[in-house]
Amino acid sequence: MAPPPPAPTPAARLLREYGWDLMLGSIAAFYAVMVPYTKVEESFNVQAMHDILYHNHHIEKYDHLEFPGVVPRTFIGALVKRKFGRHVEAFFVVLTAIQFHVLFYSTRPLPNILALALVNLAYSFWFKGNYLRTLQALIVAAVVFRCDMILLLGTIGAALLLSRSFSLMEAIKCCISTALLCIGFTVLVDSIMWQRILWPEFEVFWFNSVLNRSSEWGTHSIHWYFTSALPRSMLVAYPLCLVGALLDRRIVPYVLPVTLFVVLYSKLPHKELRFIIAAVPMLNVSASLAANRLYNNRKKSGWNFLYVLMLGAFLASLGYSAVSFMASYSNYPGGHALKALHEADSSMKEKVLHIDVLTAMSGVSRFCENEYPWRYSKEEDISIEEYQNRNFTYLLNEHRYVSGYKCLFGVDGFSRARIQPRFPPLSLVKVPKVFAHGNTGDPGVLSLDWPGCP
């Protein structure tokens, strides 16, 4: 009798149980380290984190914005393995890894991403057959973090009712009790923070849906999510998810309500990828089923060509994600400019820096600020002529020339991608977007060695 195989080491067990999670977490951590700055959509929660950490219980010092709690990210790979098999789990993780937007957004403190954690938890309950728990997770996501998750709650809830996964009375009792508990929690916390009675997500719902004022931030065509947002975010997984639904009917009851959620959201004129990013994990599951079918039949005639074509599409998706990362790295000129200015002037003389709106929207947050001798101003509506009458030591703004100030350096930002007839076929076009200026009346500023503006 052959001896039993040796017991796996603790490291081997760790990799076997959590290897895929470690891989996805490492990619997300890389994005966070390489691009630590935040833009305007993310600044609300960043400001809230700063105030909680630095001001603690001194609420009067808070910049009263949005205060969601931090929720751990939940991936559904393990449940995919249990329901569809080990190879499907592997393809699910690989497809997620070579997509840029999901993992990059997971490092951004957006309400949509905080809600995504609970949506992924809801998906895991759904796969395990805990249907009421599925509804509860989606209710928490909608009430506390992102009100538009009510659309996903509606489509999934309707599908579960039609499949008789629970009775209508069970669903009503579960939804009402969970919603009331969540409303009480969020109203209590946010009313304390804002110093007035407030349910933030209800105000968001009223502004976006009832008043329909979200279009003030721009509009897209009704098909934009399906013809632009999802193809760019899912890449090779986008066509594969359609094939997966055709090849494996087990995924159809899951994909259909999620797709209907995107369809319903398409009626809102203002569109952004982050609004429907909660659909991507489930669509990736469908894509992984198609990839697994191609892998299993790769030695058969006809299938082998499709398998090689799929591998090529995987590589192309990886290349596109690399370009997207480089573009995003260059998309925070304000943060890079502030860091460069801090490094250039290390003197202990007090200095006042004015930061304009564009700079603040492209990477500057309170976490980027230094202590004394630096002081900061974000006063708005200052005309370019008025700067010379103000006693600012430095300016960071979008203007190349400002009277009374010398342009010290400029920071490039991403402008567009350009196709070129050589390798690599895609290049990034950058243009100066943020300029640093020094007061010409301050000899300490002019004595430093500055590269000058382009």
Image (cartoon, rainbow, N blue to C red):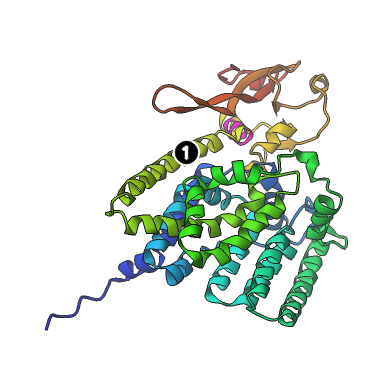
Check the image and name the residue furthest to the left: 1
Q: Is residue 368 left or right of residue 319?
A: right
Q: Is residue 15 left or right of residue 279?
A: left
Prevailing secondary structure class for the magenta stretch in the rendered image: helix
Image coordinates of residue 321 in percent, x first then y, are 48, 41
Check the image and name the residue furthest to the front: 301
Image coordinates of residue 47 in percent, x first then y, are 71, 50
Q: Does the magenta stretch include residue 335?
A: yes
Q: Does the magenta stretch include residue 185?
A: no
Q: Please tell me which residue is depicted at 46% across the width and 66% down the height of the picture.
A: 80
The stretch in magenta equals: 334-340
Q: In this view, does 448 lie above or below 88?
A: above
Q: Is mark 1 on a helix, strand or loop?
A: helix
Residue 400 appearing in the image: yes
Q: Please tell me which residue is depicted at 79% across the width and 45% down the height of the picture.
A: 214
Q: Nearer the viewer, residue 362 or 339?
A: 362
Quarter of the picture containing the N terminus is bottom left
Residue 114 appearing in the image: no
Q: Nearer the viewer, residue 347 or 379?
A: 379
Q: Return the residue at label 1.
A: 320
Mark 1: give few (<14), some (14-19) or many (20+) Cα within 10 Å: some
Task: Tell me the kind of residue under disc 1.
Answer: Tyr
Q: Please tell me which residue is depicted at 57% across the width and 67% down the height of the picture.
A: 253
Image coordinates of residue 446 in percent, x first then y, are 64, 18
Residue 406: quadrant of the picture:
top right
Residue 86: quadrant of the picture:
bottom left
Quarter of the picture containing the C terminus is top right
Image coordinates of residue 132 in percent, x first then y, are 65, 77
